Amino acid sequence: MVQTATTYTARVTDGVAMRIATIGAGNIGRAFASLAIEAGHEVLVSNSRDPKTLDQFARESGALTGSADDAAAFGDLVLVAIPFVRALELEQGRLAGKIVVDANNYYPERDGAIRELDDNEITTSELVARRFPDADWSRPSTRSWPAT
Ligand SMILES: NC(=O)c1ccc[n+]([C@@H]2O[C@H](COP(=O)([O-])OP(=O)(O)OC[C@H]3O[C@@H](n4cnc5c(N)ncnc54)[C@H](OP(=O)(O)O)[C@@H]3O)[C@@H](O)[C@H]2O)c1
């Protein structure tokens, strides 16, 4: 099920520290992680390579680092911020029971053409939510970012 991120705003800003993880530690993952740490949450970031590649960001931000599996296990809330087609390839079951914030955008030139999207039959978030039915997918809007 796709929910709006506003559903979770009260929970995140209610003075309750959460465990937040990112799958993807590029522009979006790092920005999200830094804001979450500033807001007092415990954060683990991951990418597709050795977590050591994130050591400098960890030192600067205070984030923990790990593999994508570690991130899925660690986070009560998991941001997925990777190329869209890579999100579709994440292991099923890995995100079961998690609140997942989906930052991914579809770019056919990067991700390859996906017919259902090109024909406007489904949205990107519906497509990933369909693939991970046991997770609670939400799609952030610009207004939701400061809430982290
Ligand atoms: N930049 C924006 O302004 C913006 C805005 C809205 C949405 N988006 C969307 O958000 C997503 C992320 O954008 P970005 O700008 O943060 O991208 P980016 O800077 O290129 O970072 C992508 C990150 O994803 C990681 N990654 C790739 N495949 C992975 C996998 N299978 N498992 C775990 N990590 C993986 C990469 O790690 P490695 O380097 O180790 O491969 C890297 O840390 C994209 O879908 C983008 O279209 C971007």
Image: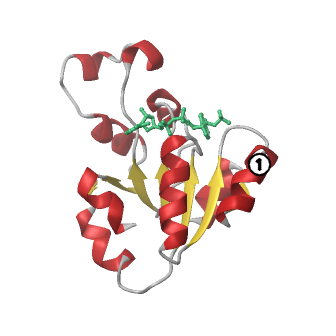
43 left or right, relative to 50 = left
Say which amino acid is labelled 1.
Answer: Pro
Badge 1 density bin: few <14, some 14–19, many ≥20, Cα 10 Å: some
Q: Nearer the viewer, residue 146 or 2?
A: 146
Residue 86 can be seen in this image = yes
The x and y percentages for residue 105 are 36, 33
Residue 139 lies, with reference to residue 40, above or below; the image says: above
Q: Nearer the viewer, residue 64 or 108?
A: 64
Residue 76 appearing in the image: no
Q: Is residue 96 left or right of residue 49?
A: left
User: Residue at coordinates 74% horizontally, 38% vertically from top-left?
Assistant: 49
In the image, 62 versus 110, the foreground residue is 62
Q: Position of residue 104 (x, y in %)?
A: 40, 38
Tell me if 84 is positioned left or right of 6 in this view: right
Residue 111 is left or right of residue 57, and the answer is left
Number of marks in the image? 1
Quadrant housing residue 6:
bottom left
| Residue identified by numbered label 1 | 51
- Mark 1 Cβ and ligand 1 under 8 Å apart: no
| Position of 52 relative to 148 (above/below) | above
Q: Residue at x 31, y 70 (%)?
A: 8
Place of residue 123 in the rendered image (x, y in percent of width and height, measured from the top left): 24, 34
Q: Residue furthest left?
A: 120
Q: Residue furthest bottom?
A: 15
- Residue sitting at x 35%, y 84%: 14
> Residue drawn 68% across and 67% down?
62
Image coords of residue 100 (percent x, y): 42, 56
Above or below 64: residue 85? above
Helix, strand or loop at label 1? It is helix
